[in-house]
Amino acid sequence: MSNRQIVLRELPTGQLGPQHFEMIETPVPRAGEGEVLLKSRYISLDAANRAWMQGATYRAALAAGDVMAGGALAEVVTSNAAGLAAGDLVFTDFGWQDYAVVPGKRLSKLPDLKPLTHLLSVYGVAGLTAYHGLIECGRPKAGETVVVSAAAGSVGSLVGQIAKILGCKVIGVAGGAEKCAWLVDELGFDGAVDYKAGGIRRALREACRDGIDVYFDNTGGDIFEACLFNMNNHGRIACCGAVSQYDGAAPQHGPRGIPGLIVTKRLAKLADLKPLTHLLSVYGVAGLTAYHGLIECGRPKAGETVVVSAAAGSVGSLVGQIAKILGCKVIGVAGGAEKCAWLVNELGFDGAVDYKAGGIRRALREACPDGIDVYFDNTGGDIFEACLFNMNNHGRIACCGAVSQYDGAAPQHGPRGIPGLIVTKRLAVTGFIVSDFRDKDAKALADLQAWVADGRLKVQEDVIEGLENTPAGLIGLLAGENRGKRMVRVS
């Protein structure tokens, strides 16, 4: 008996194709002490599979020669671990193969729910991602307008239905008239926009005449931008994925890495304090912007690394000093050696980066070897992008201004409006992965099961037969072939 494995023959530099995969056969592994031999039943196909080929994300990057990574619903064949026996079902990071040995301590027996495929869709990562992302990050209220992209996909189709259950108006964005009709006629969405028909911003404006309160983003790119321009003040954006950026070369526009973890700021009113000049600086709009933006939006903790752009300006110079008072390491970004020296020698910053000297991303990486926890953005543009790539997980970005975009023609890259519209609309943009909410999974599953049982939540699954068809299944998913959750039946 052999173990079929699909490996990455080479990492793609453009679009993913069959030539990037190869099937090999190896001996079936044996389980050691504390380990479990698993047999794959169903392999989950997700757009994130492609993102893992581009570099490290929330998991290690893939390399040529690796067994292609992916989660799977698997059955225990033999167990040398307590609490697991032959025949038990688990979900784990299994890879595209027939068999795998996994430490028992990483596994939990799945509940006996039928059909089995639901354990990969509505009761699995897709359902929990939809539930937590919408409720915890989007925070929808009855009567609000919710827009979801990739709305005919495994997560998006559930997001829209959950939003309807919660009493929201729901507009889905999908590719093609057939998918759009399915969203409205079968799933009960209030409307759907076909992004392939063009004019996405106008179409969204017509579908959402009262604006968008919550946008659940699975795509990034042009759809993200179109929604941004139609957001209501204090709208919320839950950033789940960026499928428009996964399959191909890195996007040439910027800031690259959008959508990401962005949180917004509010301003406070003028205080009646002396001397008079201070009413325009430290006790005025500048001081209050620095204080509230940093503390309320950045939420810095002692020992964290804070970076502020336009650091020699009215707001930035105060942000850095406040962050130092709060016990943070502070790096300022300013233009010119003289300003940078002033930040360190006079204001007590821990370091400063001269953006005019070039190599801003590398310079920030050297100045912040432990990454950036809080970025206070006054500039947008290349500095925003450089900080974004150096942010730590769960970092916070306070978007205060976009001075790099103010003087001249509108920027030619996109998404346009970053971070300017985030400031003026006071948007909350939150990136997340489903494991962030593991402590709330029990309630999520109870709700999901109840909604499926009473017919309010419909489950669409797209099952492909055979391990050998897994590469084609992923390639097709990236091209938008699927409707609902795509998976591969292995055994």
Image: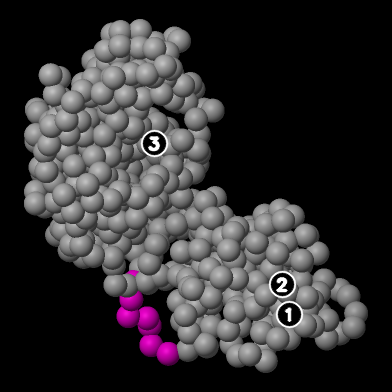
Q: Which residue is mark 3?
A: 129
In magenta, the rendered stretch is 408-414
Which part of the image, by quadrant, shows the N terminus? top left
Q: Residue at x 40, y 50 (%)?
A: 57
Q: Residue at x 26, y 55 (%)?
A: 246
- Residue type for callout 1: Val
Q: Horizontal and vertical percent for residue 74? A: 27, 21
Q: CA distance from mark 3 to mark 2?
A: 39 Å
Q: CA distance from mark 3 to mark 1?
A: 44 Å
- Residue type for callout 3: Thr
Q: Which residue is mark 2?
A: 350
275 to the left or right of 462: right
Q: Horizontal and vertical percent for residue 146? A: 38, 46
Q: Horizontal and vertical percent for residue 116? A: 24, 17
* Residue 433: numbered disc: none
Q: Earlier in the sequence, mark 3 or mark 1?
A: 3
At mark 1, the secondary structure is helix
At mark 2, the secondary structure is loop
For residue 211: magenta?
Answer: no
Dot 2 and dot 1 residues touching (CB under 8 Å): yes
When the figure is inspected, residue 56 is found, relative to residue 318, above or below; the finding is above
Which part of the image, by quadrant, shows the C terminus? top left
404 to the left or right of 475: right
* Residue 344: numbered disc: 1
Q: State the image quarter where residue 34 is shown.
A: top left
Q: Earlier in the sequence, mark 3 or mark 2?
A: 3
User: Can you see residue 3?
Assistant: yes
Q: Horizontal and vertical percent for residue 358? A: 48, 84
